[in-house]
């Protein structure tokens, strides 16, 4: 049996196995962390899209339908014409 720094091969094997398990656990933890960050970013993108849609819908709700202003102007002009007609009589 050959000793490395005074440590027997069986003890070195155990140490290497523990190191390998620790490295695997750390890699798994980091991968899980990255996956969680990616999932959260996707959720944020979806939420931002929904918020934009809601804002656009609110803006559309606040806008007058097409033609409302021209109808209002037409009615206003008609009422003014009738008023002047009545004033002339």
Image (cartoon, grey):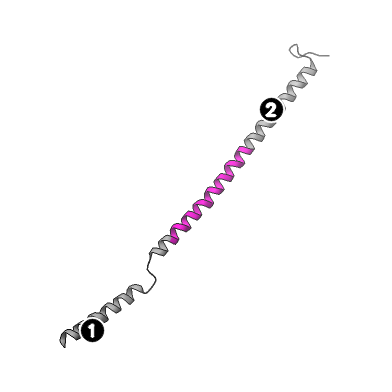
Q: Residue furthest bottom?
A: 89
Q: Residue furthest right?
A: 1
Residue that carries the numbered disc 2 in the rendered image: 22
x 75%, y 25%: residue: 17
SS type, badge 1: helix
Residue that carries the numbered disc 1 in the rendered image: 82
x 51%, y 51%: residue: 47
Residue 68 got which mark?
none
Q: Main secondary structure of the magenta part?
A: helix
Q: Earlier in the sequence, mark 1 or mark 2?
A: 2
| Residue 28: quarter of image | top right
Q: Which residues are magenta?
A: 32-57
Count every numbered label the image shows and give the total. Answer: 2
Question: Residue 42, position in %: x, y?
Answer: 56, 48
User: Observer-nearest residue: 86 or 49?
Assistant: 86
Dot 1 alpha-carbon crowd within 10 angstroms: few under 14, some 14 to 19, many 20 or more: few
């Amino acid at each position: 049996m050959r000793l490395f720094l005074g440590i027997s091969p069986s003890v070195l094997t155990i140490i290497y196995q523990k190191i390998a398990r620790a490295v695997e656990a750390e890699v798994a933890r980091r991968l899980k962390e990255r996956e969680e960050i990616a999932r959260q970013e996707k959720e944020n993108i979806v939420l931002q899209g929904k918020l934009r849609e809601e804002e656009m819908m609110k803006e559309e709700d606040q806008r007058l339908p097409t033609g409302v202003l021209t109808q209002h102007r037409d009615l206003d002009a008609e009422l003014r014409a009738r008023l002047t007609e009545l004033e002339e009589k």
